[in-house]
Image (cartoon, helix red, strand yellow):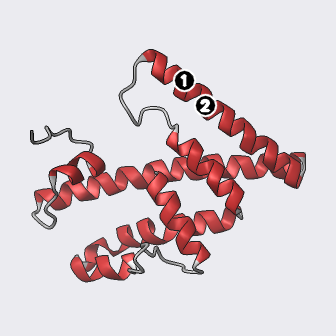
Amino acid sequence: MILILLQAFCSLEQKSEKLIFPDGLDALSFQLTRFDHRFEDYFRENYCRPIALIRNCGMEKQHYILMKAILLFTPGLCDLSPEGQKIVDNERARLCCCLHRLLISQYGEAKGVAKFAKYLMMVESFVRFNEKKRSHLEMSVILNKVVMTPLGDEIYLKRHFKYNK
């Protein structure tokens, strides 16, 4: 989810409607040339919708930085001990509180709370995008459209592999 936020915010800063990778590659055009156009709706949602969500929220740089930190401390991303989970939950709550207070101080009570709610809904959308991406990658691997490295399996498909010794 952090990656979606990072890529979308950077693309928006470049005034792009589509996801632009850090190396300048237009992700949507690249994928549409690699895959059948039956997947066009999926790619348009994955590579355009996150940018539209951030633009509609009016996310500023300092909000983006706090949101990145909040996403870093998202529960369930790692296997943690109960004590570790508690630490992560507390840090996430602290960061959410900081963002909430910042938004209220900048926009007033009503607008600040509304903007905070939009950001939380945006995170939920990013979770959905991640799940769709994982499903699409799994299907692409099954259909031999994509060959994943063991590291790619670990990162994108959450399949654990044993490191070579």
Q: Secondary structure at mark 1?
A: helix
Describe residue 32's horizontal placement relative to residue 60 as left or right. left
How crowded pointer 2 is (Cα within 10 Å; few <14, some 14-19, many 20+) is rated as some
Q: Secondary structure at mark 2?
A: helix
* Numbered-mark total: 2
Can residue 59 be seen in the rendering of this structure?
no
Image quadrant occupied by the C terminus: top left
Can residue 78 be seen in the rendering of this structure?
yes
CB atoms of marks 1 and 2 within 8 Å: yes
Describe residue 159's horizontal placement relative to residue 44 as left or right. left
Amino acid identity at mark 2: Glu
How crowded pointer 1 is (Cα within 10 Å; few <14, some 14-19, many 20+) is rated as some
Residue found at the far top of this picture: 83
Q: What x and y, as percent, mark residue 55? A: 65, 68
Describe residue 147's horizontal placement relative to residue 123 as left or right. left
Amino acid identity at mark 1: Ile
Q: Residue at x 16, y 50 (%)?
A: 150
Q: Which of the 4 image quarters holds residue 9?
A: bottom right
Q: Which residue is mark 2?
A: 91
Q: What x and y, as percent, mark residue 56? A: 67, 66
Q: Which of the 4 image quarters holds residue 47?
A: bottom left
- The numbered dot on residue 87 is 1
Describe residue 44's horizontal placement relative to residue 60 as left or right. left
C-alpha separation, residue under disc 1 versus residue under disc 2: 6 Å
Q: What x and y, as percent, mark residue 14? A: 57, 79
Tell which of 162 and 155 is nearer to you.
Answer: 162
Q: Residue at x 16, y 58 (%)?
A: 148
Q: Where is 81 relative to 97, above or below?
A: above
Q: Residue at x 65, y 31 (%)?
A: 93
Q: What x and y, as percent, mark residue 48? A: 49, 72
